[in-house]
Image (cartoon, rainbow, N blue to C red):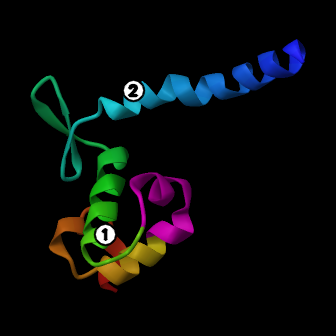
């Protein structure tokens, strides 16, 4: 039983170690705020795309968009005319 518990704890370690870092990322639209400056990052762009989709009633998260390129493409097709996501979905105007 102790071995099983130790294996389970080790399996959960990477997920719990990454969570605080993600919680500390501050975004303003597509841009991550780092030392008071805006830096364009895919993380913040995906989060902004998810928020735009959520405002339109879609139940999708930034993580789901990051982890699933097909889902991102689908959301981009739906949100393509939204100027908020023009940099995240540049090919959606076709």
Using the image, tell me which numbered label, if any, was put on residue 21. 2
Please tell me which residue lies in front, 57 or 5: 5
- Residue 15 versus residue 41 in the image, above or below: above
Question: Distance between the Cα atoms at labels 1 and 2?
Answer: 24 Å
**What range is drawn magenta here?**
60-72
Q: Secondary structure at mark 1?
A: helix
Quadrant containing the C terminus in the rendered view: bottom left
Q: Residue at x 24, y 67 (%)?
A: 85
Residue 34 is drawn in which quadrant? top left
In reply to whether residue 66 is colored magenta, the answer given is yes
Farthest residue, direction left? 36
Please tell me which residue lies in front, 69 or 9: 9
Farthest residue, direction bottom? 94
Please tell me which residue lies in front, 34 or 22: 22
Return the residue at label 1.
54
The mark tally for this picture is: 2
Label 2 Cα neighbours within 10 Å, binned few <14 / some 14-19 / many ≥20: few
């Amino acid at each position: 039983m102790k071995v099983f518990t130790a294996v389970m704890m080790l399996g959960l370690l990477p997920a719990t170690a990454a969570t605080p870092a993600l919680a500390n990322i501050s975004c303003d639209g597509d841009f991550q705020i780092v030392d008071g400056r805006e830096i364009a990052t895919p993380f913040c762009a995906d989060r902004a795309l998810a928020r735009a989709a959520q405002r339109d009633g879609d139940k999708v998260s930034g993580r789901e968009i990051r982890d699933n390129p097909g889902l991102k493409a689908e959301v981009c097709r739906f949100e393509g005319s939204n100027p908020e996501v023009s940099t995240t979905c540049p090919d959606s105007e076709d």
